[in-house]
Amino acid sequence: MYRRKNKIILALVLCMVISLAGCNSTDSDQTTEITAGEQASVTDADGSHAVKNNVTLTTGSYSDKELDDSYDEDKSTLIQCNEDKVQIDGSGASADGQTVTISTEGTYILKGTLADGQIIVNAAEKNVQLVFDGIQIDYSASAPIYIEQAKNTYITLAENTENYISDGSEYATDSSEDAPTAAIYSKDDLTFNGSGSLEVVANYNNAIQSKDDLTFISGVYHITSVDDGIVGKDSVSILDGTYTIESQSDGIKSTNNKESDKGYIMIDGGDFTITAENDGIQAETLLHINDGTFDLITGGGYENGITTAGEGDMMSGNGMRGGKDMDQQMPQNENQEGPPDAMTQTTPDHAADPTTEATDATTSESYKGLKSYVDVLIENGTFSINSADDAIHSNNNVTIENGTYTINAGDDAMHADQAMTINDGEINVPNCYEGIEGCTITINDGTVTLTANDDGMNSVNGNDESDATMGGMDADDGSTLTINGGDIKVMASGDGLDSNGSMSMTGGILEIQGPTNGGNGSFDYNGTFTLTGGTVFACGSSQMAQTPSDDSAQGYLSENWSSNIAAGTTISISNQSGNELANFTTAVESQWFCISSSKLESGETYVLNVGGTDNSITAK
């Protein structure tokens, strides 16, 4: 809402002018700008996050062995745990007190309770299957399950069993890169399958972690972690299952930022309930969701959303953000606490995560629901996201193919530094700071209903600070906002649709209610607003109101009223024969309206009825 009005004022306090060509990514999480035709490096300028995605998978890659949770008890080795004693029936495993080491390929069935003991897999280039058949392991000194060497390890949750793994708050191991940092820790590929349940309580750092690929086929998981819940360095692939995660950092994440075909998360289904102090699900290169049910709460929820202290619209007094991430922002008011450690987080020495490639001890905080540093692609699913920061975020592109979304966000409901594309879906946003943001926003179909404390939709080339340096109050920065279809309803306290570049509409239904303050408008664009199709109704403040460009092919009606029109007033348009062409009701007190429809012809005169009073009006 503030961009056009405050550019000159903001430019006075900035020390340099940024000239942007194309839609450059300038999120505070990512400093490298990628222009058309440029061969991006795998990581950003400081090497902390990926900026390139070469993942070619459209679904998770699941081998026959990963899909097969069967085992033959007669051909398996039984590891029976009895508190401080271990009995082994079969070959391939040995016990030294309460430490069990598995050294050869095979299937190992774990039963009973192991008090302060550890299972180690040290079988180089071998396939090992661990069957959790009612096993409980508590180990205070290191990872209770430590896969030191193996080609592939498969953890099968036996049918109708409950299994439990927990660690201590301090590990008696060295701080080298290879030291375990999770209750279930693997240095090689790790797969979970089976129909039983597993509870993991991580008191030291992460709950389940693989330094290679981490795959979940099925099962029921209850995870509590003082840091991340599920971490796969190269990838996390989930076919199905039920996941309840409470983490003091991220819920699910992949961390490889060095290889552009890795660092992805692929979710094909499952039920996810995640309460995370930081991000709910975070990928480096690609977050691809094909289906599933997701209930995510991050950073304490949207009520902990934070805006920049001391900033505000000069005319309306509404708050503004200082940047895409909320790393350096303050709570909305002095009586409201922000997310934990809202400025920065210093990673404790004992919780140093070797799968995180960044070497800085102090990292920026993020409280997003679904996040990727490069691309987010959602094919389908049911999503309930309550986030202190953006609900869905990418430093590059976000594509929504379908799905049902209920979003409450402290910042943007959906944000892409580059292209934000919505092809279909049902999107409901009761609360957000801004609704949909990107350098290019394209809506092709779907239902979008959102209420925003600031702009409903905002296309901007660059971040919020750099947009103020575009060289003038009405500079066209090259960003675009395009509506080709869909049923869109926006209730905005800031601008309804705001483009620092141009807008276009070719089809669909667009209804904008608000703003009511004089420092904003239902439409706010710096370039042009080309209207060639669709149905439009907008009402709100008249002071900053803009209408479609004069060369638009479709006619429209617009008028300022001498006195405010109350909320709940019916506005209808009829032709000279008395046939009603359009009918709308104001949801906010309004000084201005704009109506457009394919039924309107420029230059023709129509009957405008406002609250029962007829007037003549000519279409432009």
Image (spheres, rainbow, N blue to C red):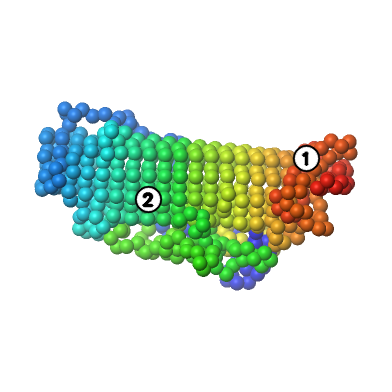
Query: Can residue 83 be seen here?
Result: yes
Q: Is residue 563 above or below residue 131?
A: below
Kindly report the distance in space between the C-alpha atoms of the residues bearing marks 1 and 2: 50 Å
Residue underneath mark 2: 246
* Residue at 20% in and 58% down: 172
* Residue at 22% in and 41% down: 135
Residue underneath mark 1: 582
Q: 111 or 598: nearer the eye? A: 111
Q: Quadrant of the N terminus?
A: bottom right
- Type of amino acid under label 2: Glu
Residue 331, percent from left and from top: 51, 64
Residue 207, percent from left and from top: 31, 49
Q: Secondary structure at mark 1?
A: strand
Residue 24 appears left or right of 157: right
Residue 438, percent from left and from top: 58, 51
Q: Residue 501 falls in which quadrant of the image?
A: bottom right
- Type of amino acid under label 1: Ala
Residue 23 appears left or right of 342: right
Residue 531, percent from left and from top: 74, 44
Q: Is residue 174 above or below residue 232?
A: below
* Residue at 61% in and 48% down: 450
Q: Residue 265 falls in which quadrant of the image?
A: top left
